[in-house]
Image (spheres, grey):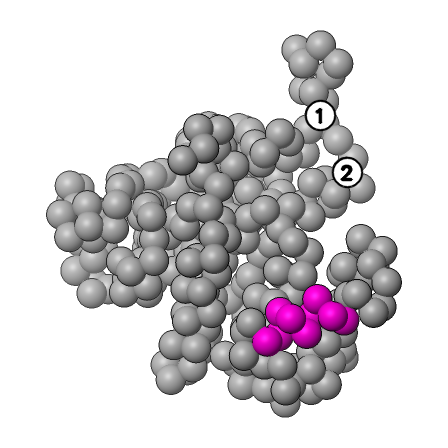
Amino acid sequence: MNTQPLVRVEGLHKSFGPQEVLKGVSMEVHSGEVVCILGPSGSGKSTLLRCINFIEEPTAGLIFVGDEIIGHRRTPDAAVLQQVRESEIARQRQDIGMVFQKFNLFPHMTVLENITHAPRLVKHIAAGPAKATAMDLLEKVGLANRAGAYPRQLSGGQQQRVAIARALAMEPKLVLFDEPTSALDPELVGDVLEVMKDLATGGLTMIVVTHEIGFAREVADRVIFVDDGVIVEQGTPAEVLDTPSHERTKAFLSRVL
Ligand code: ADP
Ligand code: MG
């Protein structure tokens, strides 16, 4: 394994008004790793993902992705960090894909347009190549025959697979998944997890917030259990899921398993 992590979260704190939601989170993810984050509702999992791609600005702490510090730039002598402008944060964010619980597809665009929109607008890819890439991705998520459909014509599971294709179209170094199957009817969960398994096998670096313990057990290289804004424990799936060392982890697992 590469020794330099792709993602390094260092001393992350996030408050909303008086409420401190993240209370000092530090973690690393290496290239090609799949990390699953588990934890009770309200423990700060979504906030953690949103800070990693700077949808939320950390109250304190730094997020390193590759050679970049999200939201910051080093001065030439590397001694001082400067805040960067929103336009530069947008550029840094291109390395980080995000898949949301509620899909968030553009309702007035076809499946194909949803996928080609950002590559064309942000990366200035020409129509032909953007479409070719989108069709490859639709093939990968099993929806090549739905390119002309609108989101409302698709099931939730199909919409989520389009959302995954849309994230991949920007060729991110890292994809964040925030409970990607929680809004789906049970019979639609499997197809989405299958696509995510394929991506994991293909070497994509993924941070996945999920309650799907079976997926975490099978696919994760590492499982992180978060409660009340801190990482309570982390380890291999076997360590965290089968022999958790903290009472809070045991209590959580007894509720979801
Ligand atoms: P989880 O994803 O683990 O369920 P969240 O990160 O969504 O937890 O939320 C953690 C806490 O932060 C909750 O108490 C939530 O109400 C609060 N919170 C999250 N986002 C905001 C926000 N934008 N403004 C105020 N409070 C927020
Ligand atoms: Mg959440």
Query: In the rendered image, which residue does mark 1 sit on?
Result: 73
For label 2, count other residues whose C-alpha is less than 10 Å away and answer few (under 14), some (14-19) or many (20+): some
Q: Which residues are magenta?
A: 131-139
Look at the picture and state if 151 lies above or below 99.
Answer: below
Task: Reply above or below: 201 against 78.
Answer: below
**Residue located 28% across and 41% down the image:** 234
Residue 227 shows up from this direction: no
How far apart are the alpha carbons under marks 2 and 1?
9 Å
Question: Upstream in the sequence, badge 2 or badge 1?
Answer: 1
Q: Position of residue 64 (x, y in %)?
A: 56, 32
Would residue 136 appear left or right of 242 to someone viewing this image? right
Amino acid found under the numbered disc labelled 2 = Glu
Residue drawn at x 26%, y 41% is 235
Task: Answer whether residue 158 is visible to the viewer in this image.
Answer: yes
Against 77, residue 4 (above or below) is below
Quadrant in the picture for residue 104: bottom right
Is 254 situated above or below 173? below
Local secondary structure at mark 1: strand
Residue bearing mark 2: 88
Instruction: Please report contact status of discs 2 and 1: CB closer than 8 Å, yes or no.
Output: yes
Is 88 inside the magenta-drawn segment? no
Expressed as whole percent of the image width and height from the top left, the position of residue 139 reads: 59, 76
Q: Describe the element under mark 2 as helix, strand or loop.
A: helix
Which residue is depicted at the point 55% across and 48% down?
174
Under mark 1, the amino acid is Arg
**For the point 41% across and 69% down, which residue is it?**
193
Choose between 136 and 60: the one closer to the eye: 136
Whether the magenta-drawn stretch holds residue 135 is answered as yes
Quadrant in which the N terminus appears: top left
Q: Quadrant of the C terminus?
A: bottom left
